[in-house]
């Protein structure tokens, strides 16, 4: 897949796929979107000291990088699982830097996220482990994963990759989620909201990041006794 590095409105980099005319992050600000949608509306909403996170679309690794540093600040213990069908190659990720947002250590962590072998669990810090899975989500065996506390649903837009936003995908994720688990995504489409509702999630529309009016946060609530 041809991918081009682009600089977004907040000065942070993203990748652009000319074949499908799609950016990996919001062109209004890649870091701003990650912090708003996945960290503030997702990670910081989980009231647990230890949690397992599933990212749908590891992509540039920005969400994993931001979560790593947020975990260091909060001292939460995180097992991070990222599923990606088309991993970045070294020539791509070596040209992407987020030091102005996360500090000099971010280069080392970012390179580890991409360079470490796939299909294995790696300890990036005492409180942060990473497992990368190279897979096609439509054929993935979700039952091979542990219970999930938080889902970053960061696939390309529904009109670009509609097969990844189907009810069958959301149903498998719902079944994998622990009680009170949260799913966050930048999408606010009515059809996506209805599909999440149809498999059992309670869905909220929240204010979106710069450039988007709304986003979605879905919760799997504890079953009443």
Image (spheres, grey):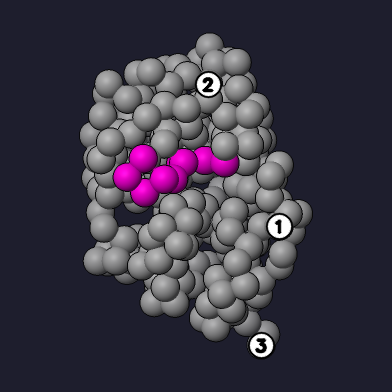
Locate the N terminus by quadrant. top left
The alpha-carbon separation of the residues under discs 2 and 1 comes to 26 Å
The mark lying in front, picked from 2 and 1, is 1
Sooner in the amino-acid sequence: mark 2 or mark 3 = 2
Say the numbered circle drawn on residue 225.
Answer: 3
Is disc 3 placed on a helix, strand or loop? loop
Q: Rate crowding at label 2 as few (under 14), some (14 to 19) or many (20 or more) other CA atoms within 10 Å.
A: some
Q: Nearer the viewer, residue 171 or 215?
A: 215
Q: Nearer the viewer, residue 88 or 6?
A: 6
Query: Looking at the picture, how far across and down is residue 21, in whole percent?
Result: 41, 45
Residue stretch in magenta: 18-26
* Residue 129 in sight in this render: no
Sooner in the amino-acid sequence: mark 2 or mark 1 = 2
**Residue highlighted by disc 2:** 98
The alpha-carbon separation of the residues under discs 2 and 3 comes to 46 Å
Q: Nearer the viewer, residue 38 or 17?
A: 17
Sooner in the amino-acid sequence: mark 1 or mark 3 = 1
Say the numbered circle drawn on residue 214.
Answer: 1
The mark lying in front, picked from 1 and 3, is 1
């Amino acid at each position: 897949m041809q991918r081009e590095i682009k600089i977004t409105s907040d000065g942070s980099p993203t990748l652009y796929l000319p074949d499908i005319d799609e950016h990996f992050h919001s062109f209004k600000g890649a870091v701003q979107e990650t912090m708003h949608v996945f960290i503030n509306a997702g990670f910081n909403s989980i009231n647990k000291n230890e949690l397992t996170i599933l990212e749908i679309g590891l992509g540039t690794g920005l969400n994993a990088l931001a979560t790593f540093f947020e975990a260091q600040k909060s001292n939460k213990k995180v097992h991070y699982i990222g599923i990606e069908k088309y991993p970045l190659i070294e020539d791509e990720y070596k040209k992407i830097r987020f030091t102005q947002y996360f500090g000099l250590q971010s280069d080392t962590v970012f390179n580890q996220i991409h360079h470490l072998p796939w299909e294995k669990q790696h300890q990036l810090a005492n409180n942060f482990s990473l497992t990368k899975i190279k897979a096609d989500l439509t054929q993935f065996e979700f039952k091979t994963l542990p219970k999930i506390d938080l889902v970053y649903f960061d696939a390309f837009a529904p009109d670009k990759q509609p097969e990844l936003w189907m009810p069958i995908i959301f149903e498998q994720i719902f079944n994998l989620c622990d009680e009170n688990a949260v799913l966050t995504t930048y999408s606010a489409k009515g059809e996506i909201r209805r599909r999440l509702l149809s498999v059992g999630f309670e869905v909220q529309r929240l204010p979106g990041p710069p450039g988007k009016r709304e986003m979605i946060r879905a919760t799997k609530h504890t079953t009443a006794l």
